[in-house]
Image: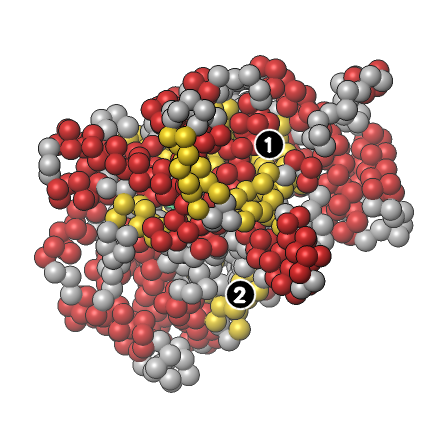
Amino acid sequence: PIVHALGATHPLALAPVTAPPASVDGFVREFLHNLNFELGVSLSASSVNDRYLALAQTVRDYLMARWLDDQRRLSEIKPKTVCYLSAEYLLGRQLDNNLLAARLTDVATEALAACGVSLEELREIEVEPGLGNGGLGRLAACFIDSLATMSVPSIGYGIRYEYGIFRQTFVDGQQVEQPDSWLRLGSPWEFPHPEAAQTISFGGHTEKYVDDDGVERSRWIPGWNVLAVPYNYMVPGYHNGRVNTLRLWRAVATSSFDLRVFNSGDYEEAVRAQTYAENISKVLYPEDSTPQGKELRLQQQYFFVAASISDFLENVLGDGVELEKLPSRVIFQLNDTHPVIAVPELMRVLLDERRLDWDDAWAITQQCFAYTCHTLLPEALEVWSVDLLGRLLPRHLEIIYRINEEFLEAVRERFGDDEMRIRNMSIIGEHPYRSVRMAYLATVAGAKVNGVAELHSQLLRDKVLPDFDEFYPGKFTNVTNGVTPRRFIRLANPDLASLITEALGAGWTIDLERLRGLEAYAEDPEFRAKFAAVKASNKRRLSDVLHVRDGFDVSEDHMLDVMVKRLHEYKRQMLKVLHIVTEYEGIASGRVAASAVQPRTFVFGAKAAPGYIMAKRIIHLINAVGKVVNEDPRVEGRLKVLFPPNYNVTLAERLIPAADLSEQISLAGKEASGTGNMKFALNGALTVGTDDGANVEIRQLVGDDNFFLFGMTEPEVEALWAKGYRPADFYQQDDDLRRAIDLIASGAFSDGDRSVFEPIVSNLLYDDRFMVLADYSSYIAAQAQVDAAYADQDAWTRSAILNIARCGFFSSDRSMRDYIDRIWHTPPVL
Ligand code: CBF
């Protein structure tokens, strides 16, 4: 009963909610009201945090009327809705984005100034919610922004982790993780609704019974449960008055845990049990590209999808909807394998709670899901041991077995008793232990399966799931990733945004293909000069930020060469290190005059998963190389290596607009797409990159003259493996490479201690899974071309502008259009 509205009759309660006046005075009044009445402080006694919280509440007040109105309208119209199921949302700071979306930036600036408050100061204290690891989580955040901007009915569902991605610090150059207590100073953007909590069950057993119609059924007798409390966040569209919802779930112990206190008198045990339940949403798993096979992770996954499905069916869909029509009301998009347990969950709800028969339930389920795969690394395709899954979700395991049985039957019908093929396609794997292959389950259940860049989707079909592609013609498709131009150009690069608007008008922000219009401007010397001035000013701005943050300075005269992404061997930060060491070694040995070297600042940003030892060693090496290079007087300050710790969305927004060169150097066939590559190109950095992921499409669009391509192609990589890859041969044959590796091995970057980086050196020489050494010479040659090209500043600027002009395709609005056309069929509701 708590969740039902209380039949209000007062005329004011029936009137539509109105926003405060969007004037400076109106804003001042609302801001002071929030400061005084919500936070309980006067302006003069308020802290910066109080002011930030009051400002956030004020912005919310302006968005509220639209949000409530949209919810009301959609519940009347009942359109088909995208439910984006994602274990990660890497949102970045909210304040500026929400001000921008609501067209309030100028009013807020003036209103705050009138109160003697600096908007800039308030901006800087916002702690970003780091509820994601990297590309996948940031993509989800871009997508919900685009869906709101395009007025597509959608709800983002996920987990409200109490601790997001760890805060990275360096101690003696080595990564040390600190907890990310992002909620510590308040979280003004969220709306908790404890009264709307869902009960989520785990454990126990199943039993058979015969229902009233004489049908034998199964039911789940769970062992324990937790509450999932929804926290709603506004997702405002850009300048369209639309506000969608992001609903993140928090785990809270049910009252049965409290009862134990009374019943057993064992307070400690009760608290332990409560902690166990609440641990489910405690912390984001800091893994990127490798699944963490922990029970808690499976609990997290089931917790949030079960709550989301139930929320959609009960609260969004409402009563009286025939379940056969469910596919015309919803599409659950599975963001990677993390939410795939939603498939048997929907089946369980339809079978056990709504009493549908198997065939009907399965027909509905198959139309309600679509699956996006974000990887090609076999180790990243999640599997759950049958043991664990059966213990935690016994009914779901039964359902998965039946899905598999029927699926394999169909495979047999089609291909005969080809046991090899059947074993390969089975949702249940047998080696090294009996397990559920979540990507297979998603592929069997999903109406569509997509990869995230052309090359990735092709490799997914050809190499990862070829039997499925053959079995399900038309099921596989591609949607190339995209990024939101609101956050990554308009907000991150305001001077560039103004320059573009001056040239093309304002429409590009929601129609990024209009950037094409800049091609003509690339030929205009005056425009090029303005563009160069913007880049220089972005470098100064970055320098100011890094100075305060880390004590680093960035020189405007240096080429800014940036590699920011998770630290993973396949991304090959090691290749970048070898390039830097090669440059340094040339100078240190006296073979190259420092004055002959193009001044460059190399910037790294990367977090390593805490348990990924090799990645952490590479971080240590980068810092160690940086220390030596930066302090060696022979270098004359012409090479600088900066590694600001704790790379996150906020830092990305400063770094990317200042970059000249974008490093996208993964081994071909390993990076599914990349999205940093798109952000850099859209901000006028040139890419040095392999033919991998979305680099391929970037290069096709910007043209070979405006892209530095190097390295083996994916088929060449395969051929080299097939032939037998011996990295030591490359070491032997290339003098520069040998000198660079020898220098690292000699202890030159570890105070003479050869043991410190020995594991990196031997890994390169005798294993080198990601073929760093094989691509080294080609990379060094590409970097020489980069230097030569940068020497002609005007030509470089022209290429930079052409990169922007030709990359409008990489807007996440376009990605959303592709999802809508090819997968979701969810038209906008204006
Ligand atoms: O599709 C979004 C991104 O996802 C990843 O980050 C992932 O976690 N699987 C991939 O590694 C990226 O290539 C991809 O752009």
Up the image or down, 632 lies above or below 528; here it is below
Q: Note whether residue 583 is visible.
A: no
Q: Which mark is residue 245?
A: 1
Q: Secondary structure at mark 1?
A: strand
Q: Quadrant of the N terminus?
A: top right
Q: Amino acid at mark 2?
A: Glu
Q: Nearer the viewer, mark 2 or mark 1?
A: 1
Where is residue 576, by image quadrant?
A: bottom left
Q: Which mark is residue 644?
A: none
Residue visible at 44% across and 46% down in the picture = 205
Q: Residue 555 at what x, y percent from top left?
A: 53, 59
Residue visible at 27% across and 45% down in the picture = 428
Residue visible at 21% across and 47% down in the picture = 713
Q: Quadrant of the C terminus?
A: top right
Residue visible at 58% across and 35% down in the picture = 246
Q: Amino acid at mark 1?
A: Thr
The reply to whether the residue tagged 1 has its Cβ within 8 angstroms of ligand 1 is no
Up the image or down, 297 lies above or below 501; here it is below
Instruction: Please name the residue that numbered disc 2 is placed on.
Output: 177
> Do the numbered discs 2 and 1 sit on residues whose CB atoms are within 8 Å?
no
Pick the residue in front: 403 or 469: 403
Q: Residues within 10 Å of mark 2 (few under 14, many from 20)?
A: some
- Name the outermost residue toward the bottom: 752
